[in-house]
Image: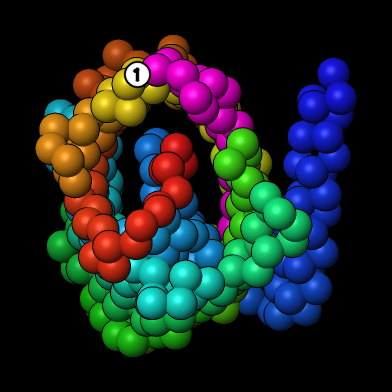
């Protein structure tokens, strides 16, 4: 009982620290961002939304990811990304690089950002990481390629294409973790970007600044079977809050399997397999359980390749469970 109380105190202490950091550093800015892509395997790729995660696990790594929505429909959303991360020789610093290609129909957004993270020790087993993300966004939308309905009606907003390059992108994040749990809070895009670039003032999507709260706990760290419940909450002013709740089991440090529920009436199955010493493959499939959608789509499929290498040959490295 005392151990549970101590863990609870540490958890809420870490959560308060994250809230104070982001409230003090973010909400003084004015800005909104375009809607961000969804990742079902967020528990293995927190760096995508939080730069504080970069270089956390003392190994050099790269992740290649693709997510195809609503298989069977032309023009359905497609997200592809490459993520690189490494600690520097001083283990309190980490750096990373993210390239995200997000598409839907004739609309494309390419985001390239670099990450920097710095770690401080709060006590003998609790760490705080702070991160900064900065880069650029290229956006284009071939409006002249769309077929308007009903045929024959002209819309001035669709008379010119949109093509904007090197818009500024930057964000911040913080993370508190121990060997038992982790809490992540971040806003990966906090500056406003205006996509109204053609002469008719076309605006693509409602621009919103999303905040992400992610957390998880590891049960059975010394055993062959481990259990990891986790959550992600994504929200912005002017948009509904979205929550993901996941439960995963890990067997012999080789195989993960689990399930997830998302509050937009989506369920998912998730798995990950270590196929070589340094290589893992992850797969997730999402299905909508909403009556009006489930009969029109064959699911959303997500594949992730993870390669990590102990470049610095340190005598001791942390075991990675998140």
Q: Residue at x 46, y 59 (%)?
A: 56
User: Split into 4 quadrants, where in the image is the N terminus?
Assistant: top right
Magenta residues, start to end? 208-231
Q: Is residue 40 visible?
A: yes
Query: Is 103 placed above or below 143 here?
Result: above
Judge from the rendering whether residue 213 lies leftward or rightward of residue 162; answer left or right. right
The residue furthest front is 315
Compare residues 237 and 205 and report the one nearer the observer. Answer: 237
Q: Residue at x 77, y 79 (%)?
A: 28
Query: Is 157 placed above or below 281 here?
Result: below
Q: Quadrant of residue 68?
A: top left
Give percent across and percent down for residue 291.
Answer: 44, 12
Give percent across and percent down for residue 163.
Answer: 26, 80
Q: Quadrant of residue 136?
A: bottom left
Residue 167 lies within the magenta run: no
Q: Residue at x 54, y 21 (%)?
A: 220
Q: How many marks?
A: 1
Give percent across and percent down for residue 49.
Answer: 48, 58
Compare residues 19 and 103 and report the one nearer the observer. Answer: 19
Give percent across and percent down for residue 282.
Answer: 25, 34
Q: Is residue 171 visible?
A: no
Judge from the rendering whether residue 163 lies leftward or rightward of residue 129; answer left or right. left
Judge from the rendering whether residue 72 lies leftward or rightward of residue 82; answer left or right. left
- Give the structural element (helix, strand or loop) at label 1: strand
Q: Quadrant of residue 209?
A: bottom right
Residue 222 lies within the magenta run: yes
Mark 1: give few (<14), some (14-19) or many (20+) Cα within 10 Å: some
Q: Tell me the residue that label 1 is attached to.
A: 251
């Amino acid at each position: 009982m005392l151990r549970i109380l101590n863990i609870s105190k540490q958890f809420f202490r870490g959560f308060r620290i994250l809230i104070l950091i982001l409230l003090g550093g973010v909400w003084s800015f004015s800005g909104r961002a375009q809607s961000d892509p969804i990742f079902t395997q967020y528990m293995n790729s927190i760096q995508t939304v939080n730069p504080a995660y970069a270089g956390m696990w003392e190994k050099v790594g790269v992740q290649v990811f693709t997510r195809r929505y609503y298989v069977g429909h032309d023009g359905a959303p497609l997200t592809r990304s490459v993520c690189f991360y490494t600690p520097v020789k001083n283990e309190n610093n980490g750096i990373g690089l993210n390239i995200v290609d997000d598409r839907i129909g004739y609309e494309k957004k390419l985001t390239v950002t670099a990450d920097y993270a710095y770690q401080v020790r709060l006590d003998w087993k609790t760490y705080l990481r702070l991160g900064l993300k900065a880069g650029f966004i290229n956006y284009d939308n071939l409006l002249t390629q769309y077929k308007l309905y009903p045929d024959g009606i002209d819309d001035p907003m669709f008379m010119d294409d949109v093509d904007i390059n090197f818009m500024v992108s930057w964000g911040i994040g913080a993370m508190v973790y121990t060997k038992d749990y982790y809490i992540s809070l971040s806003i990966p895009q906090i500056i406003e970007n205006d996509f109204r670039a053609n002469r008719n003032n076309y605006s693509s999507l409602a621009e919103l600044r999303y905040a992400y709260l992610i957390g998880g706990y590891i049960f059975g760290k010394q055993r062959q079977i481990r259990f990891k419940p986790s959550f992600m909450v994504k929200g912005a002013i002017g948009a509904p809050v979205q929550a993901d709740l996941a439960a995963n089991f890990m067997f012999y440090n080789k195989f993960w399997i689990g399930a997830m529920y998302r509050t937009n009436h989506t369920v998912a199955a998730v798995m990950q397999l270590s196929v070589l010493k340094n290589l893992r493959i992850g797969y997730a499939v999402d299905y909508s359980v909403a009556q009006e959608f489930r009969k029109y789509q064959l699911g959303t499929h997500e594949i992730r390749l993870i390669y990590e290498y102990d470049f610095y040959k340190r005598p001791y490295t942390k075991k990675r469970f998140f």
